[in-house]
Amino acid sequence: MEPIKINLATFEYQDKRLSYPVMLITALIVLLVSFFSIKTGINTQGEIKENENKIAEQEQNIIKRQRIKKENIKTLKDSEIESLKKDIDFINGLITMDAYPYDRLLDSLELSVPQGIVLSSFKMSKDLNKAVLNGKADSMDGISILLNRLNDSKIYKNNNLLNLSVAQENNTHEEAISFDNGITFEIESTIDKDQVWVRN
């Protein structure tokens, strides 16, 4: 007959023997997780600090570059500024003159000149606002007709007779008013810019 084996350990005792290893393993896992978390946090903190240092360095470099630029910028004197303005005005004047519709001025003038009038010169002011006409006429009536036609034109306004002289080689009245000797005149006209640039 075989002997009967009896385990005198209670269920409570058996549970305690199993729970200790489980608790130990759990504690180790927690320690490992905590260790890795702390290590990761330290590494991240180091990277953050490194990035902050890089940003601060870049900001310092930007400030230095801006300071160097300001030092290199040349401050112009008043005389230099005035000289530049004159050069700019001169260039703008050339551009304006090149694009200016002189043909419209001359076409309107041609329609206004009557027979017996010969124009010797046509000059314009620098701002292209005024024109000065010089010429000769065989009679005062021709000059009056010219002034009236200019006043009636759309382009020439405020026409004024500035100078008038009669060339007298002889003392006879007929020779004084003849076209060969002529009546020399000078007329100043204001140019209507709006009408000059109007396209038909």
Image (cartoon, grey):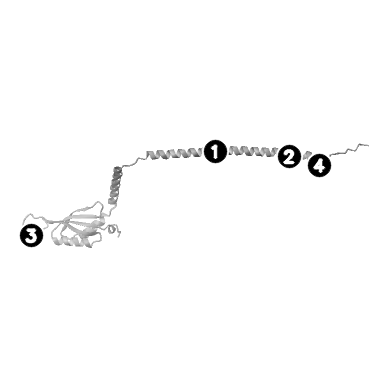
**With respect to residue 81, does 164 lie above or below?**
below
Identify the residue at horizontal 45%, vertical 38% (top origin). 61
- Residue that badge 3 annotates: 174
The numbered dot on residue 49 is 1
Label 2 and label 1: CA atoms lie apart by 38 Å
- Residue that badge 2 annotates: 23
Near-viewer residue (172 or 88): 88
Q: Amino acid at mark 3?
A: Glu
Upstream in sequence: badge 1 or badge 3:
1
Query: Of tags 1 and 3, which is closer to the observer?
Result: 1
Query: Of tags 1 and 4, which is closer to the observer?
Result: 4
- Location of residue 60 in the rendering, given as x and y in whole percent from the top left corner: 46, 38
Identify the residue at horizontal 73%, vertical 39% (top origin). 23
Label 1's element? helix
Label 4 and label 3: CA atoms lie apart by 156 Å
Q: Amino acid at mark 4?
A: Glu
The local crowd at label 1, few if under 14, some if 14 to 19, many if 20 or more residues have their Cα within 10 Å, is: few
Q: Quadrant of residue 168?
A: bottom left
